[in-house]
Image (cartoon, grey):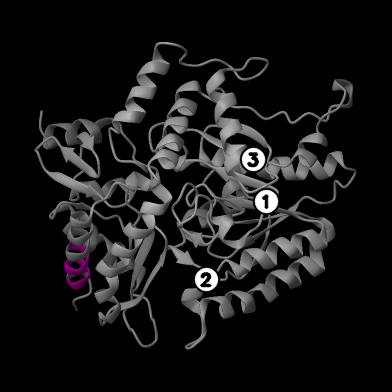
Amino acid sequence: MDNDQLMQRDLGVLWHPCTQMKDHEWLPVVPIRRGQGVWLEDFDGNRYLDAISSWWVNLHGHANPRINAALKDQLDTLEHVLLAGFSHEPAITLAERLVKLAPEGLSRVFYVDNGSSAVEAALKMSYHYWRNSGKPDKHRFITLSNSYHGETLGALAVGDVALYKETYQPLLMEVLTAPSPDCFEREPGASWEEHSRQQFRHMEALLNEHADTVSAVIVEPLVQCAGNMRMYHPVYLELLRDACDRHGVHLIADEIAVGFGRTGTLFACEQAGITPDFMTLSKGLTGGYLPLSLVMTRDGIYEAFYDDYENLTAFLHSHSYTGNPLGCRAALASLDIIEHDGVIERNRTTAQLMAEAAAPLADHPHVGEVRQHGMILAIEMVADKARRTPFPWQQRRGLDVYRHGLANQALLRPLGNVVYWMPPYVIEPEHIAHLGRVTAEGIDLATRG
């Protein structure tokens, strides 16, 4: 079996996510035979350094022996059981661990099965809390421009990336949108903190006007990942937490992409010293092994649903694979690695090596910015450096970087004109140096002419 044979079989039956399938008339599908550490290998023996952690999920490398062993053990015990009226040890232990690790006050765990579903559950919980509390008019949500929270209808509604949302607009609930604190848009000479503080005035104005009908504000802490990896300062989260408290509005922190060490701390909210009312987690939760997600919330919110059955206040939301034991066991093994191997501390050194490898690109004539929060680094290609004018999206400059990467042992999948690194934490200095070289070459190639 080789790449071409598998690609032909694939194109006969599969419909790939976030893909214009007609592209595959000229852009080969890459079938992967195996993974090991930071490397993926196809059926022709080509290797690719997984610089994007296979859509941001893989923390500890492919085929991690410790997670493998935990899953093999769990397979011999219990593969799945419903979580309504039943329970199991991995789900309980994982919830206990997360309550100890999460920002103080997040004491209840509600399992779901993927990131979008976790966002859906958090939105419904927030509205349902206010309904149970005698305030059914609090049914609206505030989001940030350029935000992304998933692609099911509720999650899509509270996002703001037109590429994903525009087509389905007639199906979506209306939300209020505050301008993002995205620091790429700051004035020359302004610091990240100054810009983030300045941008908060728009959020404050929305809350002043609409708090009586707003259920929650939802944000991606520190990094708007699908929104071209745009970043902002933690002070915005501090200001937002204070404003939500003053106005009686929930704060939902969508840490699906940024949790478990991606931004330099275990959870991004730690850098602002805040506790949200809801925190959604997925992606890196299982170390990149299995779909699992959850919502963490406070006892006070849980108690608003705790009542006699006939009062019909229960939170009736479920998924068949909620709290899957295999996923929970993988998550526990991942947390063990984070704790016992000093991963967060080691990542500080790794993040510095990433910064050094990308630093020369800041002087490239078609790079508008190199930005970083911890283990997330982004390089924004621009047509005009002085004005930060973007290349027209129709030119698909990022695709040139992607193709160059595949030809040179690197999986780089840019977001439009933004090339980014979000690698597994086991990446070594020589791997980072390789990414630096291949990325620079790809950007040179993509920005010619």
Q: Which mark is residue 173?
A: 1
Question: Closer to the camera, 15 or 154?
Answer: 154
Q: Secondary structure at mark 3?
A: strand
Residue depicted at x 46% and y 66%: 230
Query: Which amino acid, mark 3?
Result: Met
The earlier-in-sequence mark between 2 and 3 is 2
Q: Secondary structure at mark 1?
A: loop
Query: Which amino acid, mark 2?
Result: Asp
C-alpha gap between disc 2 and disc 3: 26 Å
The earlier-in-sequence mark between 3 and 1 is 1
Q: Horizontal and vertical percent for residue 295?
A: 62, 39
Crowdedness of circle 3 by 10 Å Cα count: few (<14), some, many (20+)? many
Q: Horizontal and vertical percent for residue 416?
A: 35, 63
Q: Secondary structure at mark 2?
A: loop
The earlier-in-sequence mark between 1 and 2 is 1
Task: Give the magenta part as a residue range.
Answer: 438-444
Q: Nearer the viewer, mark 2 or mark 3?
A: 3
Q: Nearer the viewer, mark 1 or mark 2?
A: 2
Q: Which mark is residue 234?
A: none
C-alpha gap between disc 1 and disc 2: 24 Å
Quadrant hosting residue 95: top right
Q: Is residue 320 left or right of residue 203?
A: left
Reading the image, the residue beneath label 2 is 182
Query: Which amino acid, mark 1?
Result: Met
Q: Is residue 151 left or right of residue 443?
A: right
Reading the image, the residue beneath label 3 is 296
